[in-house]
Amino acid sequence: MKKLILLLVVISFLAACGSDGGNASGEKKELVLGGTIPYSDMLEEGIKPYLEEKGYTVTIEEFNDYVQPNQALDNGSLDANLFQHLVYMEAFAEENNMELSSVITVPTAPIGIYSNSYDSLEDIEEGSTVAVANDPTNLARGLTVLRDNGLIEFSDDADPLKASEKDITSNPLNLQFEPVEAAQLPRTLDSVDVAAINGNFAISAGIDLTTALARDELPENIINRVVVKTENIEEQYVADIKEAVESDHFKEVIEEQFQGFHRPDWMSE
């Protein structure tokens, strides 16, 4: 009878060890990763196969907004997500009382200047209409691309991450700006002369990123990254996700499937 009780105790203990997606050693081996398009594809093609070779069971969840991925991370239904840059992560975490940490940066779809009317920036005519995002962060990025390519100028004290039309001090072509919801910018190409379009929305609309007349050079804090809850940053699965992103397999996937993406500095070292 004592042996039977002991056996049941051992079985119950082993079952408890495996109930949280771990194995007998206590390491977590079942992962749920999430992201928005195209980063859900990057997870699926570039990261998941590498982790599976290391013995993980990996599920990829696709999101269509920028709120749910962090909520899912915070409540534990995601183990890591990929869709956001550092500025957004820190602002969202502070606003929602979360503790989130960056793991590693990844190639990021840049904002590009696109046009169905012109073949180059030099062709843009006076009085041309330019569609830009109506949210502060993406508006600033779009205007910065125009500034960096000599189409407009900002005041000296303007913050490139917060710039708006009010900061424009020179507009020699008298460009006419039309604010539009960022997700709708690809649809404006038939009704405006030029549009500054986020890379993820361009991809969703079937636009080839390499056809942009110009693309933004992303600073480190605007490059997207793998993010986890801060309490999990030292877990082995987090180290393995980082290793997956640094792998040759990941780099090959980027070369083949994510052309036109801005690459973080570490990928060029």
Image (cartoon, grey):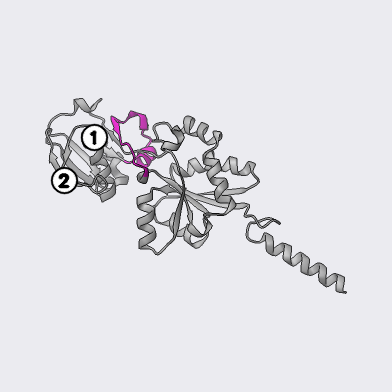
Residue 162 placement (x, y as % from top left): 24, 49
Q: Is residue 116 visible?
A: yes
| Quarter of the N terminus within the rendering | bottom right
- Please tell me whether mark 2 sits on a helix, a strand or a loop: helix
Segment tinted magenta in the rendering: 198-220
In this view, the residue in front, 49 or 157, is 157
Query: Residue 255: which disc?
Result: none
The C terminus lies in quadrant = top left
Badge 1 amino acid? Asp
At a point 62% along the width and 55% down the height, the residue shown is 28
Secondary element under disc 1, as helix, strand or loop, is helix
- Give above or below for 249 relative to 90: above
Q: Position of residue 54 (x, y in %)?
A: 64, 44
- Res 167 label: 2
Q: Say which label, 2 or 1, has the lower sequence index.
A: 1
| Residue that carries the numbered disc 1 in the rendered image | 148
Q: For residue 200: magenta?
A: yes
Kind of residue at badge 2: Asp
Residue 17 relative to residue 237: left or right: right
Characterize the local packing of mark 1: few (<14), some (14-19) or many (20 or more) Cα atoms within 10 angstroms: some
